[in-house]
Image (cartoon, rainbow, N blue to C red):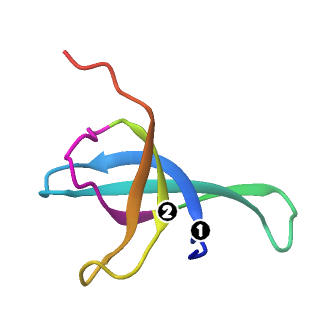
Amino acid sequence: MRERGKVWQGMVVSDKMDKTVVVRVERLVPHPAYKKYVRKHKKYKAHDPDNRCQVGDRVSIVETRPLSREKRWRVQDVLRKVASE
């Protein structure tokens, strides 16, 4: 059985591409000098084969093999859906 890669949780910030979403992952890291926690974020492109994610959804993404030039993550689960109109 293959080992599962890293798993992150984040917010979908873009769903304009076909079968791809951009997920913003935030994390807290201590400042090296002041030891106060600072919020850092990074955006990842994740594969969404069913186009089920919308902007504002909270999702879980898992690391996977390279799927395209920038896509190395896959949407594992939609944790919270945004209220649609």
- Quadrant of the snapshot with the N terminus: bottom right
Mark 2 surroundings within 10 Å by alpha-carbon count, few (fewer than 14), some (14 through 19), many (20 or more): some
Count neighbours of disc 1 (C-alpha within 10 A) and say few if under 14, some if 14 to 19, many if 20 or more.
few
Task: Tell me which corner region of the image, top left, top right, bottom left or bottom right, holds residue 80.
Answer: top left
Is residue 70 within the magenta segment?
no
Q: Secondary structure at mark 2?
A: strand
Residue 45: horizontal and vertical position, in percent?
33, 65
Q: Could you tell whether 76 is left or right of 31 in the image?
A: left
Task: Say whether residue 54 is magenta.
Answer: yes
Which residue is pictured at 31% across the width and 19% down the height?
Answer: 83
When the figure is inspected, residue 59 is found, relative to residue 67, above or below; the finding is: above
Q: Nearer the viewer, residue 36 or 59?
A: 59
The quadrant of the rendering that contains the C terminus is top left
Q: Residue at x 56, y 57 (%)?
A: 8
Image coords of residue 53 (percent x, y): 28, 41
Query: Quick one: label 2 or label 1, which is nearer the N terminus?
Result: 1
Q: Please report the bounds of the magenta region as a residue range.
A: 42-55
Q: Amino acid at mark 1?
A: Lys
The residue positioned 24% from the left and 20% from the top of the image is 84
Instruction: Point out which mark residue 21 bears.
Output: none
Q: Are discs 2 and 1 less than 8 Å apart at CB?
A: yes
Residue 6 has which mark? 1
SS class of the residue under badge 1?
loop
> Which amino acid type corresponds to the residue marked 2 in the rendered image?
Val
Indicate left or right for 15 with 34 as reference.
left
Residue 67 is situated, as x and y percent measured from the top left of the image, at 28, 78
**Circle 2 residue:** 62
